[in-house]
Image: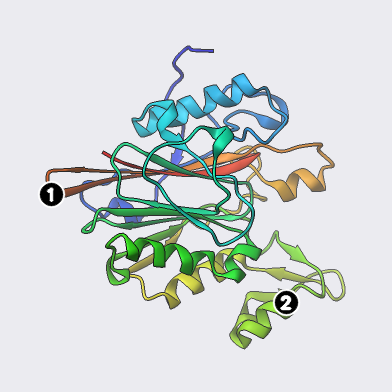
Amino acid sequence: MTEAGPPAPVIAAPAFERCPGMRHGFFTRRGGVSEGIYGTLNCGFGSRDEREKVAENRRRAAATLGVAPGSLITPYQVHGTEVATVETPWDPASAPRADAMVTTRPGIALGILTADCAPVLFADADAGVIGACHAGWRGALAGVIEATVAAMERLGAGRARITAVVGPAIGPLSYEVGPEFPQPFLEQDAANQALFRPATRDGHFLFDLAGHVRDRLGACGLAVVEGTGHDTCAEDGHLFSYRRACLRGEADFGRGPFGHRAGWEAIMPHLIIFLSVFLAGLVVSCVLW
C-alpha cells in the first residue's frame, strides 16, 4: 500500500493557531485505508487490524505532518506518569513504556494513541520545547500532566509561557462510572466533586475527564489552557471510542493519532502541532524542524 492518499481531515485548536510559525490539527478517524471497526485511520499497532494497513495509516499521518514515517514515534502507553525525553526516533517494537514525551529535537514527531482518554499537547515556542501526553483518569490522577510540565522545564521551558490544548476525549455526558469511582478524586481534592453529576442508574455518576485534565493544567500555572470540546464516544463516524466499542460488543477498536510537530530555523522557533483520533487509539505527535 504505497499510493498517496488525500490529506487526512483534522480539527484545529485556536490556541495554537494564534501562535506564529505553528501548524496543528487533531485527526479524525477519516483519511486512512483500514476497514470495518478500524475504518479508516487506525494508527494502533496494538489492535488486530492488518499491520500493513496500520503502517500505511501512520505513513499518511506522518506525511500530513511533513515527516518521514520513521520520524513519527509513539510510546508503549501504560496509564502511568513516566515521561520520555526524546533525542532520536525509535522503532515501534522498542518503544519505551511511557505516557508522555518531550523534545527539543527537530524532525521528530511525538505521537500519543487514545480512543477516549484525553490527549494533551504542550508548547513553549520561545524555548523551542514541545510535549505530548496521554491522560486517562489513572494517569491524570497520578500526575502525568504535572510530570510532563516538569520534564519540559528541565529542557528549558517556562510554565508561564506554555500553551496546552486538551484534544478530543470522552465527554461528561458519555462517561458513566460506578459508585466507588469518585472516592480517590475526592480524597485528593474535595473540589473534584464538581466533576461528578448523578447518572440515570442509581449510585452511578457521570465524570468530566477533560474538565479534570483542564483543572490540573490550570493549577500548573500555564500561559494558555484550552480544549477542543469533542466527545469521542458521542461522535460516531468522526472519532474512535473504546467505550462506544464496548457498548456495542465489538471485539476490538481503532486507535487514532493526535500529532504535534515543531521546527526551528536559526534561533526562531517554528512549531507544528498535529493531533488526531482513531478507533484504536489517539496519536499526539510533535516535530521539530
Residue 275 seen from this side: no
Residue 29: percent from left, percent from top:
57, 35
Of circles 2 and 1, which is in front? Answer: 1
What residue do we see at 44% from left, 62% from top?
148
Residue 23 seen from this side: yes
Left or right? Give the position of 182 relative to 216.
right
Name the disc covering residue 132, or none.
Answer: none
From the viewer's side, name the closer residue of 168 and 49: 49
What residue do we see at 40% from left, 62% from top?
151
Left or right? Give the position of 28 relative to 68.
right
From the viewer's side, name the closer residue of 252 and 266: 266
From the viewer's side, name the closer residue of 5 and 188: 188
What residue do we see at 47% from left, 69% from top?
146
The correct choice, above or below, for 154 with respect to 180 in the image is above
Residue 199: percent from left, percent from top:
78, 70
Disc 2: which residue: 182
Q: Earlier in the sequence, mark 2 or mark 1?
A: 2
Left or right? Give the position of 183 relative to 229.
right
Disc 1: which residue: 267
Circle 1 sits in a helix, a strand or a loop, which is it?
loop
Q: Outermost residue, right direction? A: 202
The correct choice, above or below, for 193 with respect to 132 in the image is below
Crowding at mark 1 (Cα within 10 Å: few <14, some 14-19, many 20+)? few
